[in-house]
Image (cartoon, rainbow, N blue to C red):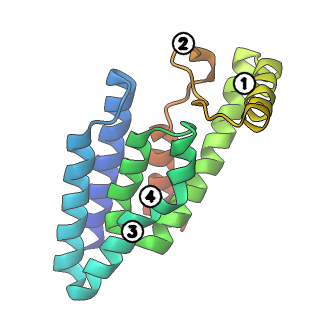
Amino acid sequence: MKEVEFLCLLCLAAMAVILDLWKGKIPNLLTFAGVAAGGTFQAIHTGYMGILLFLGGVGTPLLVLGALYYFRMIGAGDIKLFCALGGFLGAIKILTCILIAFLVGAGISVILILWRRNLWSRLTYFYDYISNYFHLKKWMPYRRDEDVDSHMHFSIPILISIILYIGGFY
C-alpha cells in the first residue's frame, strides 16, 4: 500500500512542477483531484481513523501557511498543493514536508541570489517592505509580478521534499 501512496505523491508533486513551470501556476483541478485522492486513500487504507488523518493533513498547511499567503510571500497553489499532499501524509508528516521544503527553498534561493547577483537589492527590498508595513500600517503584497528577479517556483522544493520522504529521509 505504501507503493500506491508514494506513486500518488510523486505524480502529484511532479505534475505540479511541470504545470507551474509551464503555465506559471498550479491548477485547482490538480490540487482538488489530489485532495480527493488523498481522502479516498486514507478512507480505504485506514478506515475511519484515516478520515481524521486526512482532515489534519489537509488543514495543517492552511493554518501554518495562511499568514505567508496573506502577505503574498507564497502562492495559493503552493498551499493547495501542500493540502493535497497532506491528505496522504497527515498532519505531522506534512509539517515535516513543509519544513524540509522551506529549507530546500532557502538553499535554492541562496543559489539564485548568487547566480543573479542581487543580494543587496533583495535585502534592500525586504527591509523597505518591513519598514513600510510598520510605518504606514498598510498591507501591500510582498511579491510583485514585474519583479522576475525575485521569483522562484516553490513547487520544486516541494517535489524535492516529497522525494526525500519517499526515500525514507523522514
Type of the residue with mark 3:
Gly
Type of the residue with mark 2:
Glu
- The image quadrant that residue 114 belongs to is top right
Determine the secondary structure under disc 4.
helix
Label 3, residues with CA under 10 Å away: few <14, some 14-19, many ≥20: many
Tag 4 residue: 62
Q: Residue at x 25, y 58 (%)?
A: 35
Real-space Cα separation, disc 1 to disc 4, in angstroms: 28 Å
Real-space Cα separation, disc 2 to disc 1, in angstroms: 17 Å
Q: Are marks 1 and 4 in contact (CB under 8 Å)?
A: no
Type of the residue with mark 1:
Ile
Determine the secondary structure under disc 1.
helix
- Tell whether 169 sits left or right of 44: right
Of the numbered discs 2 and 4, the one sitting upstream in the chain is 4
Tag 2 residue: 146
Q: Position of residue 88 (x, y in %)?
A: 32, 66
Real-space Cα separation, disc 2 to disc 4, in angstroms: 27 Å
Real-space Cα separation, disc 3 to disc 2, in angstroms: 34 Å
Q: Residue at x 32, y 65 (%)?
A: 87
Tag 1 residue: 113
Of the numbered discs 2 and 1, the one sitting upstream in the chain is 1
Q: Residue at x 34, y 31 (%)?
A: 18
Tag 3 residue: 57
Q: Position of residue 98 (x, y in %)?
A: 53, 57
